[in-house]
């Protein structure tokens, strides 16, 4: 087996890290959309609908508030559902790759990216010092790269 250049090893770690961050960020985006849906729902609950029993001689700008809030809510929910579907596929692929990795490396990557734990908590969970954990994290990313979905990798730069 031939030794890989430091540049190629860095490329692998960066690719693995970028992929895992995309998975983590999708989870964060879902949480943000959920909060936005809750906020719009809360605002809409205080609105009055159109009163169809009154004379249509005078209407106000607030008559459109409820339909607009409902439309916005439906758009946000549709976006959230689509993102959840995409995230489920990402988690399935990522979970399979982590299952193939096993051991401490898989634990470190799972805690960091899937569970979104801070380094201090990961150190406690794995019983390693935080300083050594950073080194293990780099090794875990290198070990994860060959297992991650190939379609998630950027094309290899020609210089490497």
Image (cartoon, rainbow, N blue to C red):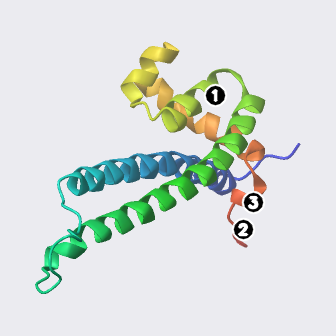
Q: Residue at x 20, y 68 (%)?
A: 51
Label 1 sits on a secondary structure element that is helix
* Residue lying at 15% horizontally and 73% vertically, measured from the top left: 54
User: What's the CA distance linking mark 3 and mark 1?
Assistant: 22 Å
Residues packed near mark 1 inside 10 Å, few (<14), some (14 to 19) or many (20 plus): many
Q: Which residue lies under the disc numbered 3?
A: 151
Task: Name the image quarter holding residue 138.
Answer: top right
Query: In front of the other: label 3 or label 1?
Result: 3
The residues bearing labels 2 and 3 have C-alpha atoms spaced at a distance of: 9 Å
Q: Could you tell whether 143 is left or right of 107 in the image?
A: right
Q: Is residue 134 visible?
A: yes
Which is more foreground, mark 2 or mark 3? 3
Q: Where's residue 42, x and y in %?
A: 24, 49
Q: Nearer the viewer, residue 16 or 113?
A: 113
Residue pictured at 65% horizontal, 48% vertical: 90
Residue 47 figure quarter: bottom left
Q: Quadrant of the C terminus?
A: bottom right
| Placement of 63 over or under 6, stated as above or below | below
Q: Identify the mark nearer the N-term, 3 or 1.
A: 1
Q: What residue is drawn where x is 57% and y is 31%?
A: 110
Q: Which residue is mark 1?
A: 105
**Label 2 to label 1, Cα distance in Å?**
25 Å
In the image: residue 5, left or right of residue 117: right
Q: In this figure, what is the number of numbered marks?
A: 3
Mark 3 crowd level (few <14, some 14–19, many ≥20, 10 Å Cα): few
What residue is pinned by disc 2? 155
Q: Is residue 31 left or right of residue 65?
A: right
Q: Position of residue 100 (x, y in %)?
A: 78, 31
Q: Extreme top residue here? A: 127
Secondary structure of residue under mark 3: helix
Residue 151 point in image, percent of width and height: 75, 60
């Amino acid at each position: 087996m031939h030794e890989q250049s430091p540049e190629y090893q860095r490329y692998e770690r960066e690719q693995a890290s970028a992929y895992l961050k995309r998975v983590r960020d999708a989870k964060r985006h879902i949480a943000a959309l959920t909060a936005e849906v809750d906020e719009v729902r809360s605002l809409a609950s205080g609105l009055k609908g159109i009163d169809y029993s009154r004379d249509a001689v005078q209407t106000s700008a607030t008559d459109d508030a409820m339909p607009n809030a409902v439309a916005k809510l439906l758009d946000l929910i549709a976006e959230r559902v689509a993102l959840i579907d995409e995230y489920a596929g990402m988690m399935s692929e990522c979970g399979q790759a982590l299952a193939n990795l096993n051991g401490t490396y898989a634990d470190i990557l799972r805690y960091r990216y899937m569970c979104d734990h801070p380094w201090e908590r990961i150190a406690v969970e794995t019983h390693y010092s935080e300083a050594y954990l950073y080194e293990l994290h780099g090794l875990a990313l290198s070990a994860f790269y060959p297992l991650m979905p190939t379609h998630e990798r950027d094309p290899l730069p020609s210089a490497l």
